[in-house]
Image (spheres, grey):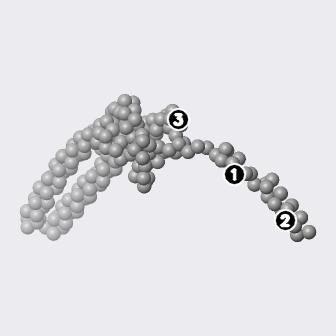
Amino acid sequence: MKISSAILLLLLTALIVPPAASAQENSTKLNVAVININAIRQNALAVRSIAEQIGKYRSAFQAEIKKEEEALRTANQELSRQRTLLSAEAFAEKRREFEQRVSEVQRKVQQRKVNLDKVQAESMGKVQGALNKIVSDIAKAKGYNLILRRDQAVLADASLDITGPVLTALNRDLANVVVAEPEK
């Protein structure tokens, strides 16, 4: 009785669990590539274009802020000079006005930084969208079913690297991105 139940269990297991050869036939062949995203971000024409435009906006912004800071320094020196000439109440009022002006400049600096970061992120989003499409197209054309970032792979043969073709396609398809002027 023990032998027949063991045989029955063995037969049922054989029917339920597919053989290893059959499982291998159903599995997809793994075709892997790696991509160096950092190299693409450093060398892509569109990214360089964005960096140049953001740099110009940042320089103009810094020049404007420098003027504001100089005006605040001048106003602070004038306030210090008037300290002995004004009554305590008049001086306190002038000091409060000056501090409000400083707060306004600080708020303006913060808002400009947020606006600059926003247009930079929007522009880089365009590059990322184009990059995603290019990588997807290359994966379909070459039959890749797994693409890893180079910085996340411990070891990868150079023949698996698709960075060059991706960068070439990105530079061809999106050489320049116009960065919108940040709000003031």
Disc 1 marks which residue? 20
Task: Assign a secondary structure to mark 3.
Answer: helix
Q: Quadrant of residue 179?
A: top left
Q: Are marks 1 and 2 in contact (CB under 8 Å)?
A: no
Tell me which residue sits at (21%, 44%) in the image: 59
- Indicate which label's residue lies in the foreground, 2 or 3: 2
First in residue order: circle 2 vs circle 3: 2
Q: Residues within 10 Å of mark 2 (few under 14, many from 20)?
A: few
Near-viewer residue (161 or 18):
18
Q: CA distance from mark 1 to mark 2?
A: 22 Å
Task: Assign a secondary structure to mark 1.
Answer: helix
Query: Is 177 positioned to the left or the right of 75 in the image?
Result: right
Name the amino acid type tagged 1.
Ala
Q: Are marks 2 and 3 in contact (CB under 8 Å)?
A: no
Disc 3 marks which residue? 140
- Indicate which label's residue lies in the foreground, 3 or 1: 1
Query: Is 111 positioned to the left or the right of 140 in the image?
Result: left
Q: Locate residue 146, reporting x and y percent.
A: 52, 45
Name the amino acid type tagged 3.
Lys
Q: Locate residue 147, reporting x and y percent.
A: 48, 45
**Can see residue 115?**
no
Tell me which residue sits at (89%, 64%) in the image: 4
Task: Assign a secondary structure to mark 2.
Answer: helix
Name the amino acid type tagged 2.
Ala
Q: Residues within 10 Å of mark 1 (few under 14, many from 20)?
A: few
